[in-house]
């Protein structure tokens, strides 16, 4: 183990052994780049072979979602992807996807600016300071630590720190300026999204949801009287009711339907095999004969049933016809559901949740912002712009005691994981300096020489592998807390996962590196000089983790982006699940559904990279270059994925996901500013310059906090609600400059002009102003209907729509039955009508003679 020691200016012995040498860093870069190339080539090949995974939107029936088919060349996707604009994404998907692109672009542009100025100004200063220490070392360039390019080598209280500090302040100003600009743009787009929702999502736009309502208020007339003071009128008050018994019947019926479909599919395949075998045999005997004269069908599928649970009944189980048994069982359950609907609905117990539908959108927004009742704690949760499909019905009636209990359980579980993470992370970070590990464990350097070459990649790779499991744990824990909406769960998962990433992948590795650096100083130097050594090299200790984080961002740049485009888990599920589990056309269709954008886990990962890059932007300038390429690659990968892959209906929050972006940006700023304040404190001396820097670091935190509070106070309501000035939209909305927001110079009419030509069918009559904005609605389309193998499904879906067209209900109203249907996942929705047998709607199932159909 080669170690070189030199004397610093104060005569203290400093250990200059490389933590991550240039050789190890170069080997790591080569490994990561090789893996990335393999992943990208695998994507290029798989894109052609598995189009249902990598370009499902080219098969979409809905014209608004359909995109041109790409050529089958290995790299024929590159130029079309580069030609996709942000406006194209907005027109073909939704506001959430558009704002994700804007966010990644904003981070990319910051690191581009930071890369140019830091490499031109900060990097030469660090290299000069590092060369003064390294020139006395006997190590070659490849053996030297990459930290000679960082702030680590600047002497304590050196005036040159002003350059790094000014660069840091300028970075904060740039980020805040870009963020304010993006928020301003988003508010305009969000308001237009809310206005547009009243034309194509009336049910969502006109309805608010109340939960945790006291029993004394669970009366339609009382609720009506309270909210009738608002402008417009209350169209409908619906109180949720307990349908647990119905839920059990419907669940049993759905299981029977799935079994029956699987049996019929299996029997159909057997019949086809018998037919093909017979035809092949007769063709050999009489090649000119095209008609099979005789055909013996395979035996009907059977299964054994027990009359009781005793062992004797198991031995004497009766063998019966499976198709006949399940068909009769299905008819029986259908009758039970109908009987329940006709006789027991009115007797069901009321739950503590209410839906209120208004005649005006502004009434719903005013109601959501108002104090509803004079008695405190009468209403627990009040929200507007809620899609009933987003509601978690089983959680609406959960008591506050059980919610608090589950919240405590979830918090204790996450705290336990956080505590256990500390020793794990300390052990992993120790692998950064593999030579010290070998020395402590007394390992043979010759046998473990390969570890020296890849030491820079071990720690970041292991930490990233462990962090893959965390989102699943957090999703489970948040899911049991009783939140009323799925979107609330996703927002909370996004918040907690980001905080855990900061703790597990940023704070703990920093303290781990500092701990090992301090231990090295106290063990390597004379005890009488320990304190002097510590003060003299405080910058070296405070920034000791810079090499690790450079390797971490390098890993994200290559492996992170290439695995993002390869989409390994969806590819695996798409390849394995249909083969083993798709035993019926419906199950195969569901197994092939396009994936949605997993925003609640991917956004925190992007902002973790931003936090690392921003914090070390002036400390280790090379990190800016890697962060820039990471966000640039992610930006163009998202162009492809949003346009050709992701089902945007699974990521459709009306742009609200951008609120998480705002919160996480400020969180990153606070953490980075705290690090710089600590650095200024440890570099504090009696000189006026160091005192001014420390005071300025404190002022920067206060300014950031001021911006945060102002944005939260002034823009929060704009992000969620419509202003009164937009309550009445006339037919000239698109041409009125008061409401017409420019997105860019090429599209002066804003986003509504982009929507005029993307819908292709009407769902009913519209007012003049509605037709002006949205003359055609996508409501009657199923979201993803595929062409070839699902043609029969499409035919049945169209027949169903034609039959149902005369029975459609007012889309602005909830009814008690609608509420129960949604709770039971019994939806009157085109997306669920995917085969002749529909397990998701019992209201019209008796239009089909199930028993005769199945027996035939």
Image (cartoon, helix red, strand yellow):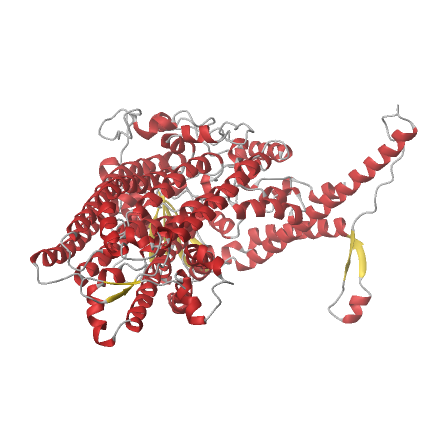
Q: Please give the name of the residue rendered at 27% of the width and 24% of the height, measured from the top-left corner.
A: 735
How far across and down, in percent of the image, does residue 61 sit? Answer: 53, 31
Count of marks overlaid on the render: 0
Relative side of 338 to 637, left or right = right
How far across and down, in percent of the image, does residue 291 sit? Answer: 86, 27
How far across and down, in percent of the image, does residue 844 sit? Answer: 59, 42
Quarter holding the C terminus is: top right
Judge by depth and name the residue closer to the eye, 595 or 215: 595
Relative side of 76 to 143, left or right = right
Relative side of 39 to 311, left or right = left
Tell me if residue 747 can be seen: yes
Quarter holding the N terminus is: bottom left
Tell me if residue 767 can be seen: no
Judge by depth and name the residue closer to the eye, 292 or 181: 181
Judge by depth and name the residue closer to the eye, 539 or 292: 539
Q: Residue furthest left?
A: 688
Q: Please give the name of the residue rendered at 30% of the width and 60% of the height, measured from the top-left corner.
A: 544
Q: Residue furthest bottom?
A: 527
How far across and down, in percent of the image, does residue 614 sit? Answer: 28, 49
């Amino acid at each position: 183990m080669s170690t070189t020691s030199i004397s610093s200016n104060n005569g203290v012995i400093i250990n200059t052994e490389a933590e991550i040498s240039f050789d190890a860093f170069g080997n790591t870069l080569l490994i990561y780049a090789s893996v990335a190339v393999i992943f990208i080539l695998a994507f290029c090949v798989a894109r052609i072979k598995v189009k249902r995974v990598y370009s499902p939107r080219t098969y979409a029936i809905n014209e608004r979602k359909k995109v041109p088919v790409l050529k089958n060349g290995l790299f024929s996707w590159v130029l079309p992807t580069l030609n996709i604009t942000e406006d194209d994404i907005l027109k073909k998907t939704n506001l959430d996807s558009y704002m994700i692109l804007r966010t990644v672009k904003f981070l990319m542009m910051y690191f581009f600016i930071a890369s140019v100025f830091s490499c031109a100004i900060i990097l030469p200063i660090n290299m000069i300071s590092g060369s003064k220490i390294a020139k006395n070392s006997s190590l070659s360039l490849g053996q030297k630590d990459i930290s000679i390019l960082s702030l680590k080598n600047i002497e304590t209280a050196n005036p040159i720190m002003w350059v790094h500090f000014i660069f840091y302040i300028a970075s904060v100003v740039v980020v805040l300026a870009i963020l304010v600009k993006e928020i301003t743009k988003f508010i305009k787009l969000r308001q237009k999204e809310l206005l547009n929702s009243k034309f194509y999502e009336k049910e969502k736009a006109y309805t608010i949801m109340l939960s945790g309502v006291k029993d004394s208020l669970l009366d339609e007339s009382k609720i009506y009287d309270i909210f009738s003071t608002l402008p417009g009128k209350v169209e409908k008050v619906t109180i949720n009711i307990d349908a647990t018994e119905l839920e059990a019947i419907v669940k049993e019926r759905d299981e029977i339907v799935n079994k029956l479909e699987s049996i019929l599919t299996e029997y159909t395949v057997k019949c086809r095999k018998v037919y093909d075998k017979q035809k092949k045999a007769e063709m050999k005997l009489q090649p000119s004969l095209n008609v099979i004269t005789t055909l013996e069908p395979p035996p009907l599928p059977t299964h054994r049933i027990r009359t009781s649970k005793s062992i004797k009944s198991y031995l004497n189980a009766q063998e019966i016809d499976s198709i006949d048994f399940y068909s009769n069982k299905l008819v029986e359950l259908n009758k039970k559901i109908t009987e329940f609907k006709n006789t027991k609905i009115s007797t069901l117990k009321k739950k503590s949740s209410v839906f209120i539908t208004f005649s005006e959108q502004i009434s719903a927004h005013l109601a959501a912002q108002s104090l509803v009742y004079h008695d405190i704690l009468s209403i627990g949760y009040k929200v507007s712009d809620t899609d009933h499909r987003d509601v978690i019905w089983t959680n609406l009636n959960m008591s506050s005691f059980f919610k608090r209990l589950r919240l405590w359980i979830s918090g204790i579980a996450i705290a336990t994981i956080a505590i256990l993470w500390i020793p794990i992370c300390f052990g992993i970070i120790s692998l950064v300096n593999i030579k010290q590990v070998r020395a402590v464990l007394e390992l043979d350097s010759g046998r473990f020489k390969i570890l020296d070459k890849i030491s820079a990649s071990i720690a970041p790779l292991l930490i990233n592998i462990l962090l893959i499991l965390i989102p699943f744990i957090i999703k489970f824990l948040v899911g049991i807390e009783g939140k009323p909406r799925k979107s609330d769960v996703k927002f909370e998962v996004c918040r907690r996962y980001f905080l855990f990433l900061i703790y597990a992948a940023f704070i703990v590795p920093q303290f781990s590196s500092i701990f090992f650096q301090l231990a090295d100083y106290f063990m390597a130097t004379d005890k009488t000089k320990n304190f002097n050594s510590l003060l003299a090299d405080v910058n070296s200790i405070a920034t000791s983790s810079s090499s690790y984080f450079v390797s971490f961002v390098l890993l994200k740049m290559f492996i992170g982006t290439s695995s993002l485009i390869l989409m390994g888990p969806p590819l695996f599920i798409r390849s394995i699940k249909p083969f083993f589990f798709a035993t019926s056309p419906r199950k195969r269709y569901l197994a092939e559904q396009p994936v949605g954008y997993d925003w609640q886990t991917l956004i925190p990962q992007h902002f973790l990279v931003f936090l690392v890059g921003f914090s070390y932007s002036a400390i280790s300038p090379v990190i800016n270059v890697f962060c820039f390429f990471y966000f640039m690659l992610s930006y163009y990968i998202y162009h492809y994925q949003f346009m050709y892959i992701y089902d945007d209906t699974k990521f459709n929050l009306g742009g609200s996901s951008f609120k998480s972006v705002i919160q996480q940006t400020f969180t990153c700023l606070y953490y980075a500013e705290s690090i710089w304040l600590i650095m200024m404190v440890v570099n504090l001396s009696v000189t006026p310059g160091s005192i001014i820097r420390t005071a300025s670091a404190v002022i920067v935190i206060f300014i950031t906090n001021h911006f945060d509070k102002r944005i939260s106070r002034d823009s929060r309501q704009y992000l969620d609600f419509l202003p009164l000035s937009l309550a009445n939209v006339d037919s000239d909305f698109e041409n009125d400059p008061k409401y017409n927001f420019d997105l860019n110079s090429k599209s002066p009419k804003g986003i509504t002009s982009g929507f005029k030509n993307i819908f292709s069918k009407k769902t009913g009559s519209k007012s003049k102003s509605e037709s002006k904005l949205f003359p055609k609605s996508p409501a009657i389309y199923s979201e993803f209907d595929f062409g070839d193998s699902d043609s029969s499904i499409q035919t049945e879906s169209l027949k169903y729509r034609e039959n149902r067209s005369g029975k459609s209900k007012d889309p602005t109203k909830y009814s008690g039955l609608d509420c129960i249907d949604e709770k039971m996942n019994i939806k009157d929705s085109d997306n669920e009508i995917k085969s002749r047998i529909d397990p998701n709607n019992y209201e019209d199932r008796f239009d089909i003679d199930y028993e005769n159909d199945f027996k035939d």
